[in-house]
Image (tube, helix red, strand yellow):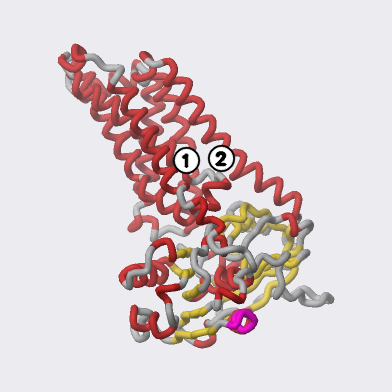
Amino acid sequence: MAQTATGTRRPELIGGIGDRSAAAPGRAAARRWLPDAVLGAAGVGLGAAVGSVLTSETRGQLTQAGGVATVVGSLTGMVGAYLALLMVLLISRLPLVERTIGQDRLARWHRRLAPWPIALLALHAIAITVGYAQAARVGPWHEVGTLLSAYPGVTIATAGLGLMLAIGLVSLRAVRNRLSRETWWLIHLWMYVALAISFVHVVVLGPSFVVHPVATDLWDAAWAAAAGAILAYRFGLPVVRSVRHRLSVVDVRTEAPGVVSIVCKGRDLERLDVRGGQFFEWRFLARGLWWQAHPYSLSSLPRPPYVRLTVKGVGDHSKALAALRPGTKIAIEGPYGAFTNDARTRRRVALVAGGIGVTAIRSLLEEMPRTAEPVVVLRASKPEDLALRAEVADLVKERRGSLQEVVGARDEIELDAKALRRLVPGIAERDVFVSGPESFVFHVVETLRAMGIPDEQLHYEAYAF
């Protein structure tokens, strides 16, 4: 049962901070070069990592017993450690990168990259062991015993690699889907320990640094910068913002079956540089919830001193939020996300929401000007599941747009190309914003791409449950 603050007037959140609806299309378009620049810089760094290994080896070393295997081990170790560094940077929440590329896109890059450093570091351990065994003319298992007993650094590195492999196995979709998000998150935190071990091991024992002392300095600086970014933007800044704004729960109200809105009150919310469509990592300081933070989109722009999020109960954490009591303190991290009005490249827009994806669409709609002529498509299995429908309808009416509702089972009513063209007139001339569960979002986006709509006009936020 949702808790309601007694003795106080329920705050209504239909307005927002200032008037940003007149923002010119594509403020972020001028930074469209940033993803390519990030990938380019990563490629340059990869080339430097490979070059530092290759230039440290000589032809004579390659012709010696075990020389080829040792070089392969050095190369895979260096590249694996470098890719691990990139993994850290992708989730370090660097403001410019995060706001331009978007955390969901960075997270996808992170997930796709993750298997490579783990696999390369495992290959590094095998190749180095084989190379050293061939050089010593002993068996590989004998060399394993020698390395572990004679080199403490190798023992620690082996423990770190074992930790990485375990986390990698847990992160496989087939395994992760069997775990709660909370359990997976706790296990995943150990990756920081494994990465720290990897850094120390490469610097202390990496042969590339013996010949290239400058490489040691650059490697130290790169990892120090990554660690500094993590500490500053994932820990320091959230603490500062949480203390500054002092958010607490005011009201919890039911919006639809299994969906609740949580109204929060805080200080100086006008100082929050938040845009419609963005989200925060929310940490509710209540029993059983305080130790974990979860991402939830704002369902309306802040209206000081209030701000609101709307959540669908699909997991242990989200279901527990319906029982939050007024006065519960909140710590926040964010705002995050590039799913904003700044991403617009065209005058007119279409907004497509599947289920609880209406939250980001609802707040994003607040910043859309009348000239955007928004067409909003809400998708739900049943009419009662159309959360925030009345608010969306009012915002659409104010902006002289149109609201389309698609209600029914997904296998009965599909948002295919024909349906999208019918629901959204002139869709090819619009920016299209899509929000909702991953399967829904990726289906709609792929359909739009097949319709010939270029990627620069497609903007999406996928919710992983």
Image point 67% across, 76% down: which residue?
A: 253
Q: Which residue is mark 2?
A: 230
Q: Amino acid at mark 2?
A: Ile
Is 55 colored magenta in this rendering? no
Q: Mark 2 and 1 residues: CB-CB less than 8 Å, in contact?
A: yes
Mark 2, other Cα within 10 Å: few <14 / some 14–19 / many ≥20? some
Image point 60% across, 43% down: which residue?
A: 233
**Of 25 and 275, which appears nearest the observer?**
25
- Dot 2 or dot 1, earlier in sequence: 1
Q: Main secondary structure of the magenta part?
A: helix
Q: Which residue is mark 1?
A: 88
What count of labels does the image hold? 2
Is 396 colored magenta in this rendering? yes
**Of 360 and 431, which appears nearest the observer?**
431
Circle 2 SS class: helix
Residue 143: percent from left, percent from top: 24, 20
Q: Amino acid at mark 1?
A: Val
Image point 39% across, 40% down: which residue?
A: 40
Residue 105: percent from left, percent from top: 45, 55
Residue 378: percent from left, percent from top: 50, 80
Q: Is residue 56 above or below residue 277?
A: above
Which segment is the magenta one? 395-400
One can see residue 353 in this view: no
Q: Is residue 95 above or below residue 299?
A: above
Circle 1 SS class: helix
Q: Looking at the rendered structure, which numbered label has been put on residue 50?
A: none
One can see residue 244 in this view: yes
